[in-house]
Image: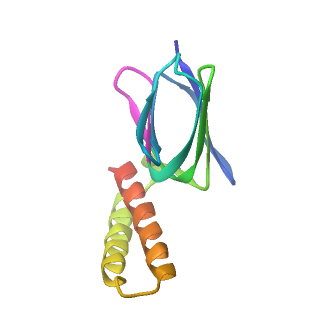
Amino acid sequence: MTLTVRVIAPDKTVWDGTADEVILPSITGQLGILSGHASLLTALDTAVMRVRAGKDKWTPIALMGGFAEVDNDEVTVLVNGAELGEKINREQAQKEFTEAEQKLAAISTGSRQEQIQANQAFKRARARLQAAS
């Protein structure tokens, strides 16, 4: 049996197809979803979701936070933003990650707002780089 998986961002549908397995980056850790999984609603972190469609064909998708619902072998992922790993320029993602990492390290004495923004930028850059790798 397979799962029906949809990843929906505000501006586009990033993935709409079937899969054998999905690994979701929930805010409490990674969740593996197979057919027959119990119903579930979870918040998602800014990280990489992985979709296995075929024996060993994994597709990474960088997610920018959101929610996932699992019900009756359907996985619906609603996110603030998402990108397929294959569409991310690895060199650009590496550059953005390095910049975000340096900014996060330098902001330790900044305001709480600046720290939160730097941390979010770092998580976005890390997710994009991991999905591109």
92 displayed left or right of 65 = left
Q: Residue at x 54, y 53 (%)?
A: 65
Magenta stretch contains residue 53? yes
Main secondary-structure element of the magenta-colored stretch: strand
Does residue 76 appear anywhere in the picture? Answer: yes
Q: Is residue 3 above or below residue 59?
A: above
Q: Residue at x 37, y 73 (%)?
A: 100
Please tell me in which quadrant of the rendered image residue 29 appears.
Answer: top left
**Whole-percent x, y for residue 15 in the image:** 58, 38
Does residue 52 appear anywhere in the picture? Answer: no
**Whole-percent x, y for residue 116 in the image:** 47, 73
Q: Residue at x 35, y 67 (%)?
A: 97
Q: How is the image coloured?
A: rainbow
Q: Is residue 115 above or below residue 12?
A: below
**Whole-percent x, y for residue 119 in the image:** 42, 70
Q: Nearer the viewer, residue 124 or 93?
A: 124
Q: Is residue 39 above or below residue 124?
A: above
Q: Is residue 78 above or below residue 95?
A: above
Number of numbered discs visible in the structure rendering: 0
Magenta stretch contains residue 64? no
Q: Residue at x 40, y 67 (%)?
A: 122
Q: Nearer the viewer, residue 14 or 44?
A: 44
Please tell me in which quadrant of the rendered image residue 89 appears.
Answer: bottom left
**Whole-percent x, y for residue 77 in the image:** 60, 40
Which contiguous range is marked in magenta?
Answer: 48-60
Q: Nearer the viewer, residue 73 or 128?
A: 73
Please tell me in which quadrant of the rendered image residue 126 appears.
Answer: bottom left
Question: Which residue appears farthest toward the top when viewing the image?
Answer: 1
